[in-house]
Structure formats: structure tokens, C-alpha cells
Image (spheres, grey):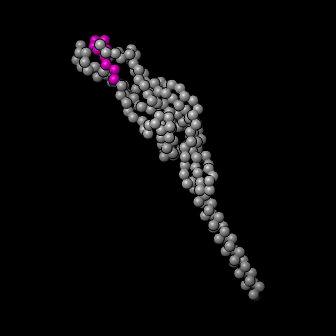
């Protein structure tokens, strides 16, 4: 009977030690599985130019024959950011777009912009706006960092930035 009791005690000690070790390892593993931070890493792929358009176009005018207060008005966005990273959550998408905007153009968010082109009657309105953006494309990686110093690339893909915008008019805007 004492042998059985000793065995039970030994098994109990071994089992308790194994369970304690398993719990300790499991707890450490659970904490290691949760990232302590997430970063967005960008590398420039290409730069170029792209044509855009007005988000809205209006004609503001006064009485026929008057040469003051007549404008063609193009409303456009100051910049655009886009990412192609597959199925990502909105918070991550916004963080990546913000990083692209800040890196490429120093902007934290896009703004609505307005360009005015005066015209004179009876010859106008007769101008066409063209919005042109400088473009930059990026290779994008979203990386999780862990307490033990390891990293994991969670998303990898591409992103693009259009900005700053410039508006030109055809024929050009001029004054008399």
C-alpha cells in the first residue's frame, strides 16, 4: 500500500509539474501570439503622372454681357491614396492609407479643393478643366512585432498615392 501511495504521490508531483510547465508554456505562448505593435512599411516602386477629373463642375455667372463675376468652377480632391492588400479590416486600411499620404505628400487627410477660371460673355463659358496628379506607387507590408523580438508580415501588397493635384484649363484662364 505504501508503494501505491508513493506512486500516486510521484505521479501527482510529476503531473502537477507537467501541468504547471504546460500552463506556464501555454501562457507564454499565448502572450507571444499577440503582437505588441503593428507597423506599416513602404518601399517606393514607381513615380509618374496621372490625369483625373473634377468631382463636380459648375458655372457661376451673372447677367449676359457682364464681364465680372463669371467663373467656371472645378471641385476636386487634393490627393488620393489606395491600397491593394486583400481582405483587410477598415482600421488597418485607414492606417496604411494614412501612412502613404504622410510619406508621399505630408498630408494627413485629403481635402476638397476648388479651382476657378474666369470667363467673359458672350465668349464663355468655354473652358475645360484637367486635374493632374503626381503619382507614387509603393510596395506595402503590414508587420506585427512580438515581445520576443520576432515579426510576422500580416499583409503584403501595393499602394498608390496621387497628389498634389494641379488644375489646368483649356483654353487657359486669362484676364483682360
**26 vs 168, nearest the viewer:** 168
- The residue furthest top is 123
Q: Which residue: 42% across, 38% down?
A: 109
Please state which of residues 128 and 137 is positioned toward the viewer in this rendering. Answer: 137
Using the image, determine if residue 174 lies above or below residue 27.
above
Tag count: 0
- Which residue shows up at 22% across the image and 17% down it? 63
Residue 118 horizontal/vertical position (percent): 31, 19
Name the side, left or right, on which 153 lies relative to 100. Answer: right
Q: Where is residue 105 in the image (x, y as percent from the top left)?
A: 47, 34
Quarter of the image where the N terminus is located: bottom right
Dividing the picture into quarters, in which one does residue 22 lie? Answer: bottom right
Q: Position of residue 171 (x, y in %)?
A: 39, 14
Overall secondary structure of the magenta section: loop
Q: Name the side, left or right, on which 100 lies relative to 75.
A: right
* Direction right: furthest residue: 3
Q: Which residue is drawn at 62% across and 62% down?
A: 28
Residue most toward the bottom?
1
Please name the residue shown 51% across and 25% down the image: 49
Is residue 125 located in the magenta-colored stretch of the structure? no
In the rendered image of this protein, does residue 160 appear above or below residue 38? Answer: above
* Magenta span includes 118: yes
Q: Give the range drawn in magenta.
A: 116-124
Residue 60 pos. (x, y %): 29, 22
Visible residue check, residue 43: yes
Q: Quadrant of residue 55?
A: top left
51, above or below 33, in the image: above
Tell me, yes or no, if residue 33 can be seen here. no
Q: Which quadrant: the C terminus?
A: top left
Amino acid at each position: 500500500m505504501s508503494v501505491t501511495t508513493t506512486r500516486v504521490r510521484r505521479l501527482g508531483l510529476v503531473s502537477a509539474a507537467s501541468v504547471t510547465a504546460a500552463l506556464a508554456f501555454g501562457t507564454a505562448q499565448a502572450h507571444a501570439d499577440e503582437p505588441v505593435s503593428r507597423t506599416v512599411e513602404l518601399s517606393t516602386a514607381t513615380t509618374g503622372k496621372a490625369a483625373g477629373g473634377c468631382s463636380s463642375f459648375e458655372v457661376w455667372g451673372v447677367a449676359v454681357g457682364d464681364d465680372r463675376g463669371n467663373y467656371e468652377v472645378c471641385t476636386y480632391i487634393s490627393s488620393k491614396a489606395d491600397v491593394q492588400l486583400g481582405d483587410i479590416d477598415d482600421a488597418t486600411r485607414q492606417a496604411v492609407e494614412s501612412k502613404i499620404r504622410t510619406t508621399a505628400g505630408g498630408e494627413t487627410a485629403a481635402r476638397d479643393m476648388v479651382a476657378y477660371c474666369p470667363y467673359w460673355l458672350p465668349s464663355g463659358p468655354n473652358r475645360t478643366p484637367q486635374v493632374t496628379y503626381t503619382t507614387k506607387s509603393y510596395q506595402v507590408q503590414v508587420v506585427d512585432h512580438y515581445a520576443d523580438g520576432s515579426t510576422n508580415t500580416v499583409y503584403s501588397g501595393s499602394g498608390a498615392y496621387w497628389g498634389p493635384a494641379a488644375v489646368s484649363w483649356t483654353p487657359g484662364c486669362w484676364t483682360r
